[in-house]
Amino acid sequence: MADLSPLHPERVRPLRRAEYERLVELGVFEDERLELLRGALVTMSPQGGLHADTVARIGEALTLALAGRARVRQHSPIAVADDSEPEPDVAVVPLGGSRLEVPAKAFLVVEVADSSLSKDRNVKAALYAAASIPEYWLVDLNGHAVEVHRAPGPAGYGDVARLAASGATLRPTAFADVALSLDEILG
């Protein structure tokens, strides 16, 4: 067998967010579920029924509670860096802004994980913290728990708590009057 190692690039050039958005506009990825993470196109895992239902319940609860105060987006991109545009399961973003631009700020981002737990915990948490998103909830469907990440900084979130007890309540720091029970989120 031939040695193909000389054909491997010395360096990979990451894709920039502006380039990615232009390719999306052109329909290049029309039939693919992708997100841009650290300059790389990453395929998104297919959603099962439990994942889809959990995302819908969280989105509905937050939409009702935050009507007129913030927008709740589901499976929509957020511009967190020049080389990253993840599509969180739920994002609570400020009202207003251009309908044509991807939001760059969020009050809260939520990822629901079954097969994507490692990527959501390690890669996405770091991206959201570096983008100064004040709060990130990671719903661990397999562990039947929610990790609440707060106090973002360049090294990640400084405060991480794992809630697994029935009856526990989550309150977004930006909207302390809003309460979602763990039972409501996990079903």
Image (cartoon, rainbow, N blue to C red):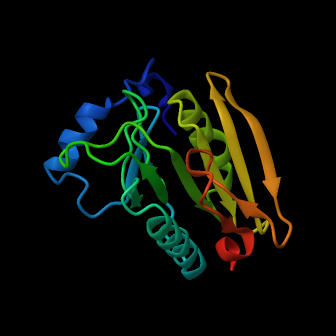
Which residue is at a point 57% across and 42% down the rendered structure image? 124
Name above or below for residue 7 compared with residue 176.
above
**3 lies left or right of 77:** right
Residue 86 x/y as whole percent: 44, 45
Which residue is at a point 25% across and 42% down the rendered structure image? 97
Which residue is at a point 67% across and 61% down the rendered structure image? 139
Q: How many marks?
A: 0
Name above or below for residue 64 compared with residue 175.
below
Q: Name the outermost residue toward the right.
A: 165
Residue 56 x/y as whole percent: 49, 74
Q: Within the image, what quadrant is residue 183 found in?
A: bottom right
Which residue is at a point 50% across and 65% down the rendered structure image? 62
Residue situated in front as seen by the camera: 82 or 57: 57
Q: Name the outermost residue toward the top.
A: 10
**Could you tell me which quadrant the C terminus lies in?**
bottom right
Residue 105 x/y as whole percent: 41, 38
Q: State whether residue 39 appears in this view.
A: yes
Residue situated in front as seen by the camera: 156 or 61: 61
Residue situated in front as seen by the camera: 28 or 137: 137
Residue 64 x/y as whole percent: 46, 70
Q: State whether residue 87 appears in this view.
A: no
Q: Name the outermost residue toward the front.
A: 177
Name above or below for residue 57 compared with residue 151.
below
